[in-house]
Every structure is written in C-alpha cells, then in structure tokens.
Amino acid sequence: MDNAWVRQIALAQSAYDCSCRPEDFLKKENVMVESFPSEKARRYLKLPHICNLVSYGSNIVACGSGPFLEEIRQYLESIPRIESCFETPGLYLLNRRLARFDAQVCFMADYFLPDPDAVFRFDGACAYEMRILGQEDFEELYLPQWSNALCEDRKSLDVLGIGAYDAGKLVGLAGCSADCDSMWQIGIDVLPQYRRQGIASALTNRIAREALARGKVPFYCAAWSNVKSVGNAIRSGFLPGWVELTAKPVSFVEEMVAKW
C-alpha cells in the first residue's frame, strides 16, 4: 500500500469514468475519446458526458458526446497550456462553443489522493471522543449540518462514518461514500462553533485510515476556491491527484442555481 498503488487505482477509475485507458492520462499529447456509459464508472456520474476534461498533470483527456468532440479538439488546440484550459479567460471560449449545444461549464474541482505514509504519520489530536459509525447509525443524521458527510439522495452508498462527540453530542462527522468499487469519497462537516480545533483533519485522517484498512482508496474533492477544504485535505495526509471540469445542459445548471 503505497503511492504507486493509490495512483494505479485512481488512474484505472478515471479510465472507467472517461471511457479511455489508464495510460492515456500519462501521455504527453492530449487524448480525445467518445464518452459512453460504464457500470464501473463513479455511480453518481450521468454518462455519457457532453464535455469532460481531466488532467493528472501530463496532458488532458477529453471525453464527450460525438457532435461536440470536434469543438473540444479545437478548444484544446487553441489554448497554449494545460492549466489555461481549466481557467478563465479560456473557459469563456469553451462556454461559447458549449452554447451551440445548449450546455455550459458546471463543475470544476481538485481531487486529492492519500499519501499512505503521511496518512499513517498524522499526529493531529482531537479533543473529543471519536466513534466509528455504520449505515445503521446514519438514518437520523440526514440533516443539513451533515450534508457534506452524508448524501440523502444516495443513502445506499454511505458506508462508513467517523463521528466526533462532545459529551454525547455529535459535533463533527466524516463520511465515506462507496462511489465506485475500489474508491470511496470522503465528505466532512463540523458544527460552526467547533471549527478551528483540528476536528476536521482528525476525522478526515481517521476515516482515510479506516478506508485504506478495508482495501479502498479514499479520495477527497474540493472546489479550487475552497481554501479551507484544500487545507484540510493536505493536513490530513492527502496530495493533489487530478483536476476535472464537467459541462452540463444549461437547464441542469439553472436548476442548481435556483436551489441556492
């Protein structure tokens, strides 16, 4: 169980998600592929993608629906650097192309993978009792304050939790969602009055250890602008793994905005 093992599993999963091969993410040149459904893809993904860009740092693997693939190719060829394809002003150009298909950029995120040595070297203390929780403990916890740790729309995927308790009161919760067979996604919530006490990093690290002990690779997703969440990932023993950009129909984006 080392960084090479973690990376191999992550590349294999990204290949299922992007309809390509694991080695495609390690090439120097960009790779274009048609997106199609896969039973092994992350279970919350809605495939096929209109446009999905993934980079592990060497290149970009771009997958999308047939009519839009040529638009993606032209976009990638028009941008001089990999990083710029995921940033403005380049994204304005991509959105113009997506508009022709009634779509626009929707999700942009950094994904973090565990450094096993750092995870098991973590020495952050938590002043509160921590308990391991299972699915049988979650039913009463599908509440707004725990909406990052648990997902009510996908209860069946919530497989593991670690709670922090202050005199019997739940004050912090980390959850693992079995989003795919080999990788579990971590979510974390801490009540506002208990933040900045090291609870988030202690819970995130502990649940990462528990996932690794079960033979699963935990992964952690954060918006690039969520400085606090990125900091928590790094403190907990995680390293940057890959970046991902996903386009959705305009109606989907508008529905999300309306819920805010």
Image (tube, rainbow, N blue to C red):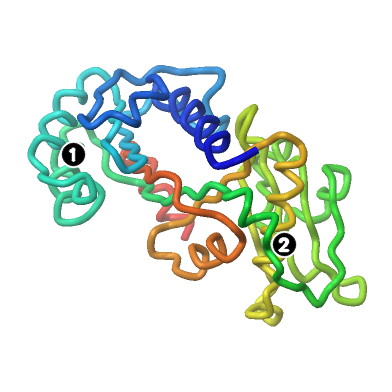
Disc 2, SS = helix
Q: Secondary structure at mark 1?
A: helix
Residue 129, x across and y down, in percent: 87, 69
Report the number of discs: 2
Let me know if residue 67 appears in the view: yes
Q: Is residue 178 above or below residue 31?
A: below
Q: Is residue 147 left or right of residue 104?
A: right
Sooner in the amino-acid sequence: mark 1 or mark 2: 1
Sort mark 2 into few (<14), some (14-19) or many (20+) by Cα contacts within 10 Å: many
Tell me, for residue 203, which label it has, or none. Answer: 2
The answer to whether 228 is drawn above or below residue 153 in the figure is below
Residue found at x 74% / y 57%? 206
Residue type (three-letter) at the residue carrying disc 2? Leu
Residue under the point 75% across and 73% down = 125
Q: In the rendering, at what x and y percent does residue 253 appear?
A: 36, 46
Residue at 38% over, 47% down: 107
Position of residue 257 in the picture relative to residue 40 (left or right) = left
Residue at numbered disc 1:
99
**In the image, farthest residue toward the right:** 168
Residue type for callout 1:
Ala
Apparent side of residue 161 relative to residue 259 in the rendered image (left or right): right
* Nearer the observer, 80 or 109: 80
- Distance from disc 1 to disc 2, alpha carbons, whole Å, reads 42 Å
